C-alpha cells in the first residue's frame, strides 16, 4: 500500500507517494506563509482529484491532540494557536491524516530506514528555516506529553542573547538556523541575503560570512553535547537545507572533536537527505490504523 506523504516546512512543502523508503512522484511548492487555512488549501490543490487511501503529514510546529498545530516560533511559520490541521485536511480532502511534527517524523524515517539504523538512542536534527529535532530513545519515537519533545532549536546556547520568536532569548535557532544565518549576516553587511548567499560568500573568502557559519557550527556542537549529557544518545544525524549544505557537517565535527571524550558521539549526515520526513511520516501512518 502506498501513502501520500506531505512535509510542511517554513520554506517549502514536499509531496510524494511513499512505499517503505521508496518515493514516487516527489514534488514541492513554496510554503504559503499566511496561516493554517492557506496550508490546507495548498495541499488540497496539490492532491485534487486523486484521493489517497492514506494521508501522512509531517509539519513544522508543535503537534498535539492527534492533529492540532501550534507554532512554537511563529517567525519560522505563522500558524494560529491550536489550528485543527487534521480535521481541516479531512474536511477538505476526505481522508483523516496522521499529523506528526516534521523533525520527529524525520527522526523516525532516519531511524527506520537511514542513518539511524542500528542506533539505540538516536537523534535527528534539521537545520533549515528553523531548527527542529526528533528523539528515538530505546527504539521509541518520543513526542512528549504535549508534542514538544525534541524541540532542540529552543535550547539556549552560550554567548547568545537575541530574542527568539518562541519568547525565550539566546535559542540555538537564533544563531544557527537558515533564517538566523541570513539575518545575522544581512545585518552586518546592510542588505537582505539568503542562507545560500552566506555560504557562497564564505566560500569566496568573506571573513564575516565565515564567522556566521563558525558560530552556527559551534552552537550546534554545544547543543549536541548538552543532549548527550541529558540522554546518552549514541548517534546524531544532521539534515535540513542548511544541515546538508556543503561543509556544515565538517564544521560541526571540528567543534565536537574538541569536547571531552564523555560527550563525543557519532555525528552523521541524514541518509534520506531532504526526504526523511516524508519517509518517516509515511511509515508511521502505515503502522497506525486510520
Ligand atoms: P524547510 O525549512 O521548509 O523544511 P529547507 O530544509 O530547504 O526547508 O530549509 C530552508 C532553509 O535552508 C532556508 O534558510 C534556505 O536558505 C536554506 N538552504 C536551502 N538550501 C541551501 C543550500 N544549498 N545552502 C545553504 N542554505 C540552504
Ligand atoms: C521551529 C518549530 C519546530 C520545527 C522547526 C524546524 C514552528 C513553526 N516550528 O523550531 O516545530 O520542527 O522549526 O522547522 O514553531 P523547519 O521549517 O525548519 O523544517
Ligand atoms: Zn526559541
Image (cartoon, rainbow, N blue to C red):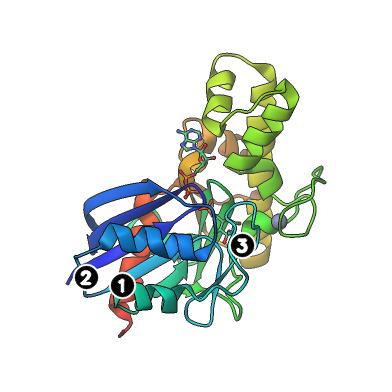
Across and down, in percent, residue 44 comes to 33, 64
Identify the disc placed on residue 151.
3
Q: Earlier in the sequence, mark 2 or mark 1?
A: 2
Where does the image place residue 28, in percent across and percent down from the top left? 34, 48
Quadrant where the C terminus is found in the figure: bottom left
Judge whether residue 138 can be spotted in this image. Answer: no
Left or right of 7 in this view: 20: left
Q: Under 8 Å from ligand 2: the CB of mark 3?
A: yes
Asked if the beta carbon under badge 1 is closer than 8 A to the nearest atom of ligand 1, the reply is: no
Label 1 Cα neighbours within 10 Å, binned few <14 / some 14-19 / many ≥20: many
Q: Nearer the viewer, residue 78 or 110?
A: 78
Element carrying mark 2:
loop
Callout in the foreground (3, 2): 2
Question: Can you tell which of label 3 and label 1 is closer to the viewer?
Answer: 1
Q: Which residue is mark 2?
A: 51
Query: Where does residue 157 sit, x and y in percent of width and height?
Result: 75, 49
> Pointers 2 and 1 in contact (CB under 8 A)?
yes
Check disc 2: other Cα within 10 Å, few if <14, some if 14-19, many if 20+: few
- Determine whether, in the image, residue 213 is placed left or right of residue 266: right
Contact between marks 3 and 2 (CB within 8 A): the answer is: no
Instruction: Say what secondary structure mark 1 lies in.
Output: helix
Q: Which mark is residue 93?
A: 1
Residue 279 numbered mark, or none? none
Amino acid at each position: 500500500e502506498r501513502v501520500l506523504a506531505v512535509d510542511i516546512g517554513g520554506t517549502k512543502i514536499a509531496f510524494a507517494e511513499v512505499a517503505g523508503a521508496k518515493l514516487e512522484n516527489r514534488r514541492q511548492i513554496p510554503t504559503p506563509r499566511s496561516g493554517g487555512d492557506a496550508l490546507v488549501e495548498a495541499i488540497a490543490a496539490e492532491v485534487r482529484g486523486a484521493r489517497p487511501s492514506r494521508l501522512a503529514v509531517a509539519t513544522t510546529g508543535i503537534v498535539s491532540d492527534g492533529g492540532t498545530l501550534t507554532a512554537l516560533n511563529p517567525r519560522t511559520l505563522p500558524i494560529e494557536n491550536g489550528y485543527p490541521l487534521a480535521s481541516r485536511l479531512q474536511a477538505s480532502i476526505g481522508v483523516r491524516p496522521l499529523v506528526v511534527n516534521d523533525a520527529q517524523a524525520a527522526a523516525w524515517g532516519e531511524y527506520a530506514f537511514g542513518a539511524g539504523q542500528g542506533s539505540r538512542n538516536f537523534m535527528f536534527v534539521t537545520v533549515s528555516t528553523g531548527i527542529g529535532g526528533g528523539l528515538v530513545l530505546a527504539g521509541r519515537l518520543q513526542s512528549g506529553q504535549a508534542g514538544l519533545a525534541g524541540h532542540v532549536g529552543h535550547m539556549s546556547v552560550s554567548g547568545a542573547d537575541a530574542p527568539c520568536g518562541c519568547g525565550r532569548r539566546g535559542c540555538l535557532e537564533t544563531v544557527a538556523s537558515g533564517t538566523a544565518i541570513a539575518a545575522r549576516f544581512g545585518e552586518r553587511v546592510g542588505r537582505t541575503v539568503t542562507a545560500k548567499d552566506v555560504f557562497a560568500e564564505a566560500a569566496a573568502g568573506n571573513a564575516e560570512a565565515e564567522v556566521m557559519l563558525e558560530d552556527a557550527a559551534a552552537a550546534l556542537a554545544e547543543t549536541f553535547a548538552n543532549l548527550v549529557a541529558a540522554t546518552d544518545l549514541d548517534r546524531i544525524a544532521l539534515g535540513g537545507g542548511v544541515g546538508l549544505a556543503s561543509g556544515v557537517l565538517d564544521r560541526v565535527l571540528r567543534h565536537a572533536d574538541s569536547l571531552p571524550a564523555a560527550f563525543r558521539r557519532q555525528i552523521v549526515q541524514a541518509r534520506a537527505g531532504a526526504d526523511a520526513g516524508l519517509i518517516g511520516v509515511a511509515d508511521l501512518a502505515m503502522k497506525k490504523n486510520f
